[in-house]
Amino acid sequence: MIGQRVLRSEDRRLLTGASSFSADSSLDGQVHAAFVRSPYAHADLLDVDVSQALVVPGVVAVLTGRDYQADGLSSLIHPSNLPDHLDPSRPSFTDDELFPPPQAPPIVMDRVRHTGEIVAMVVADSTEVAIDAAELVVVNYRPLPAVTDARAALEDDAPRVWDAGNLCASAERGDAALAAAAIENAAHVVRVSLRNHRVHGSPIEPRSALGLYSSDSGRYTLYAPSQGVHRFRRALAVALGVDNAEVRVVTRDVGGAFGLRIPCSNEYPLLLWASRRCRKPVKWEGTRSESFVADVHSRDTHCEGALALDDGGKVLALQLDYLGNVGAHPLSFAVLANLMRMAGPPYDVPAMHVRVRGALTNTTPTSVYRGAGRPEVTHIVERLMDLGAEAVGLDRAEVRRRNLIRPAALPYQTRLGLTYDSGTFGANFEEALQLIDWDGFESRRAAAESRGMLAGIGVANYLESPAAAAYERTDLTITADRTVEVVIGTQASGQGHETAFAQVVAGTLGVSIDAVSVAFGDSDVAASGSGSHADRSMRLGGTILVNACEDIINQGRQRAATLLDCEDTQIDYVAGEFIGADAGGSIDLFKLAAEAPLTATGEISTRLHAHPNGVAACEVEIDPDTGALSVVRYVSVDDVGRAINPMIVEGQLHGGTVQGIGEAVFEELVYDQEGQLVTGSFLDYGLPSTAETPSLEGHIKECLTASNPLGVKGAGEAGITPAAAVIVSAAVDALRAFGVTHLQTPLTPERLWTAMTSGIHQA
């Protein structure tokens, strides 16, 4: 069962209209909410006049930050207040390296710090009435100077987002002196300034939620999309000033997550608060326009990188200096932590130094997005490898070949402290080169030129080090009706958990997959858990499922021994049957559960580090007349460890790759100098379609890790991690005749056309 291409059991529900997304949730007597959002990026809030809105027929309430304060409610949890097992960024930072501003309430009381912040909430009998009444709320602002660029935010004369200053994190890792000395004495040093531009996750389903307060029970219930209901529950309990047990969070089907659903959004405690005040369920259906200004954004980092090499192309040292734009409120330090932890993979780099800083700006907060730092690291390291190859006079493939970590060096410890336990980096690299026919590309370049197109080829190695919340839990029950009931704390958002988890349980217990039911997404049903992120679900969730199944088997062996009148050491377990020695008879697992259910709990409180890795290679063509770029071929070789379901893994790899193509070529969030988002709709923010996506050739490798019993490394973020790096490499190769040595993303027609006409290095 484990390793088989089993069709996803959840797809029938999702494809036949039987699914239940957040906007599908409804309760009798519900009312509807609309939010008044700031049009300014930075302004003092002088007055909020709700009088006109209150008299609109159908309006139930109009609430402001002063009302929220008067009711004694608090802010949502800042990551620095999370315990280590819930916050994957904390172990990478010491307390004196983080200095976030004060926590901000979910509804503004005195100062707005980015466009789209909530300044009032209207509750009415219908969404239409609520929206109309919201337009009648009169807000008096005093505009203030704004800063949107992280580099400008750290200038001495920059507007202060918060009074204490705009720097909210600063840390260094590695050996600064050793790296500097190696760079000073190296035969070749290459440098690059690279920006990973700001992007939006753009899930199919905009955020929507339904909040309910029950005066009978004194409990709050939130129906909302999430990547983990227990994280939401804790954040909401803090904001509402109640115990965790007084909050229930329910997540059903999720129309895309990618990291955007990890933070508990400001709207959610407000809906619960409004329900308590109005004594009715309160529903909100977010619009796409709200998504662009109020959903968390991602990426937006600058990095100054330097790579030193000797005359033979051997890397001697790597320096990386990152500056991340965290927006107006720090929601997560996980991206900065990942940037700080994993310079250089999968190359043997003798000296490393990494500096990471986080800057506050008057922009929507940034948080994790698929890859969360790994694409950024891969991008700059691979750009430096390309530039290093040119400086030394080697082929781009050859300089990589000479620096990949050899199998004999494993386990390999990086100069930043990570340990890679397994991987066939060189073999994967050679396979990718063969698949793309690297050596035969010049004939294809010539053929493209005969058609009037400019062709280029690129290759990129990647290696991930996905951190994750350490805690996870599952509860298994074997029932008399021949069912294995699984409840687990991690949360599906389209990855195929219901099928893959069932495969693990069915394979470990030796029962039919049809006998296994998997439940998650309800904090009243799942006792605890940490959700889905950072390739953790199968590494941690799969581990505790295996452990719980083994516990069940051990319990069953003891029961069977009693029934079969033998020692438990004489009982074998095969394909759901407990078999006694010397023809002592047998008994079925489910029959054992007839007298009393067999139950087991699996828990874990460690991160089980693993390092998914691989290689991507692609070819692009550029129209010299327009600058339009097409990715015409894309191949990858991906070591995901054990592939529980190769079909699901392939889908994950393909989906991530398409998102990476979008980020590299089409997508970008842009602010003007006043902090207004000028790419606030899909008319301005481009997404790739099937027309812009080539046939993707993925090749799964299974080099198992020893960190977990299944040998799983992870696949959810593998596709996106090398995409920008390999596409930029190919684009630069296509434009080399024009003197182009580097390109910033996204690779828009304007940017490429300008590069061709200017004929200079593109900074």
Image: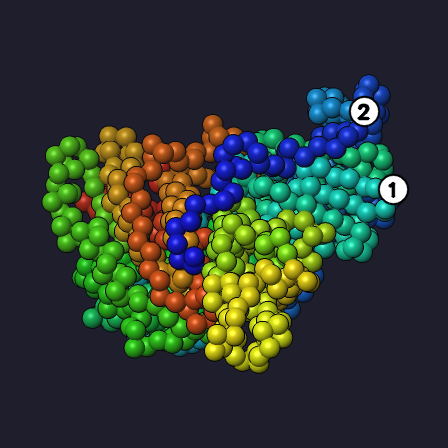
* Relative depth, front residue between 321 and 264: 264
Dividing the image into 4 quarters, which one contains the N terminus? bottom left
126 over 638 or under it: above or below: above
Of labels 2 and 1, the one closer to you: 1
Residue lying farthest to the top in this orientation: 57
Residue 434: x percent and y percent? 19, 55
* Relative depth, front residue between 376 and 556: 556
- Residue at 15% in and 32% down: 451
Q: In the drawing, does residue 597 fall left or right of residue 12?
A: right
- Residue at 51% in and 49% down: 514
How many neighbours does mark 1 have within 10 angstroms: few (below 14), some (14-19), or many (20 or more)?
few
Q: In the drawing, does residue 211 fall left or right of residue 727?
A: right
679 over 359 or under it: above or below: above
- Residue at 43% in and 33% down: 686
- SS at badge 1: loop
Residue bearing mark 2: 59
**Cα distance between the residues tagged 2 and 1:** 22 Å
Report whether residue 261 is seen.
yes
Residue 51: x percent and y percent? 84, 25
Residue 641: x percent and y percent? 39, 63
Residue bearing mark 1: 215
Label 2 sits on what residue type? Answer: Val
How many circles with numbers are drawn on the protein? 2
- Residue at 29% in and 40% down: 695
Report whether residue 730 is seen.
no
31 over 361 or under it: above or below: above
Residue 648: x percent and y percent? 42, 49
- SS at badge 2: strand
How many neighbours does mark 2 have within 10 angstroms: few (below 14), some (14-19), or many (20 or more)?
many
Label 1 sits on what residue type? Answer: Ser
